[in-house]
Image (cartoon, helix red, strand yellow):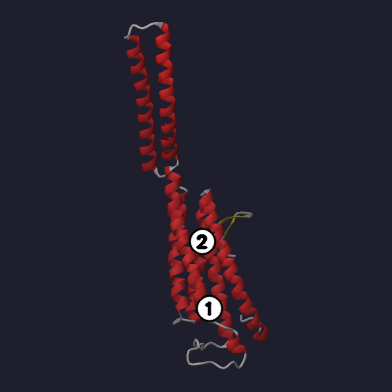
């Protein structure tokens, strides 16, 4: 596999090599099927691969604007709470009351402060996880696009029935046209399988350095989808290869 970074061990996916692999696959499809819709899909996959390389790198970088805004808000909250608490203590000291009344006021202050802290804690949790949620939304959008591409690839192989080139089946006026030879059909299905595999690898790029549970689950779904679709294609390829052998 050309999409791995060799540093003594296979540890990380190399986005640049994956893009190069998709580009090479696009050239191979253009050489054999320049007018096929699969070539157009592969060019779209190449564009998506280049975007995935950039976006996956962006996911590892801090979003400084969000961090600055969150830091300012947190500091403002802390200062506001401290000022309110100090102001209340000053007002209590300015009122001549007995010790029991002072303790009662203090308990009321603590009770109100607890409620305020719970609300502020929820707000702070929202703010501190804002950056991760923004990155998650970006990753999910691109992962969804890869899921759609996988289904489009499957649509292009859907009517490529090997029985139509390995038998004397009679077609009708509404039967899908298939002008490929047995060798060409085998290669076409092979290209579909490679595109699906690369689609799964592009999805994995988004979570390679972005440890988000929701994004990981979405990538797992894409990988399961592409694996299942590839399995169906390989079943077709087995039928073709039993007749003509593997096309080199």
How much space separates mark 2 and mark 1, taking CA atoms? 23 Å
Where in the figure is residue 121, as x and y percent of width and height?
A: 44, 33
Circle 2 is placed at which residue position?
202
Residue at x-position 45% and y-position 41%: 129
Q: Quadrant of residue 227?
A: bottom right
| Viewer-nearest residue: 38 or 216 | 216
Q: Is residue 6 above or below residue 72?
A: below
Q: In this view, does 100 lie above or below 118?
A: above
Task: Left or right? Give the position of 65 relative to 188.
Answer: left
Q: Do the residues labelled 2 and 1 touch (CB within 8 Å)?
A: no
Pointer 1 residue: 158
Q: Eyeballing the image, is 202 above or below 30?
A: above
Which residue is pictured at 64% across the width and 81% down the height? Answer: 246
Instruction: Name the quadrant of the N terminus.
Output: bottom right
Nearer to the camera, 12 or 37: 37
Mark 2 or mark 1: whose residue is earlier in sequence: 1
């Amino acid at each position: 596999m050309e999409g791995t970074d060799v540093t003594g061990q296979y540890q990380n996916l190399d986005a640049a090599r994956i893009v190069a692999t998709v580009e090479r696959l696009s050239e191979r499809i253009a050489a054999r099927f320049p007018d096929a819709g699969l070539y157009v899909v592969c060019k779209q996959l190449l564009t998506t691969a280049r975007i995935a390389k950039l976006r996956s790198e962006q996911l590892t970088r801090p979003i400084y604007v969000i961090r600055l805004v969150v830091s300012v808000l947190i500091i403002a909250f802390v200062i506001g709470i401290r000022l309110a608490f100090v102001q209340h203590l000053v007002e209590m000291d300015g009122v001549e009351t007995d010790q029991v009344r002072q303790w009662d006021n203090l308990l009321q202050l603590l009770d109100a402060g607890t409620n305020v802290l719970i609300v502020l804690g929820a707000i702070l949790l929202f703010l501190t996880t804002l950056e991760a949620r923004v990155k998650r939304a970006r990753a999910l959008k691109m992962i969804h696009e890869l899921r759609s591409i996988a289904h489009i690839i499957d649509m292009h192989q859907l009517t490529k029935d090997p029985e139509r080139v390995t038998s004397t089946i009679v077609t009708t006026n509404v039967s899908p046209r298939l002008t490929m030879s047995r060798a060409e059909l085998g290669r076409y299905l092979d290209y579909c399988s490679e595109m699906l595999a690369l689609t799964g690898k592009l999805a994995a790029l988004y979570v390679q350095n972005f440890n988000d549970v929701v994004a990981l689950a979405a990538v797992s779904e894409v990988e399961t989808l592409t694996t299942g679709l590839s399995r169906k294609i390989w079943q077709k390829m087995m039928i073709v290869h039993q007749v003509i052998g593997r096309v080199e």
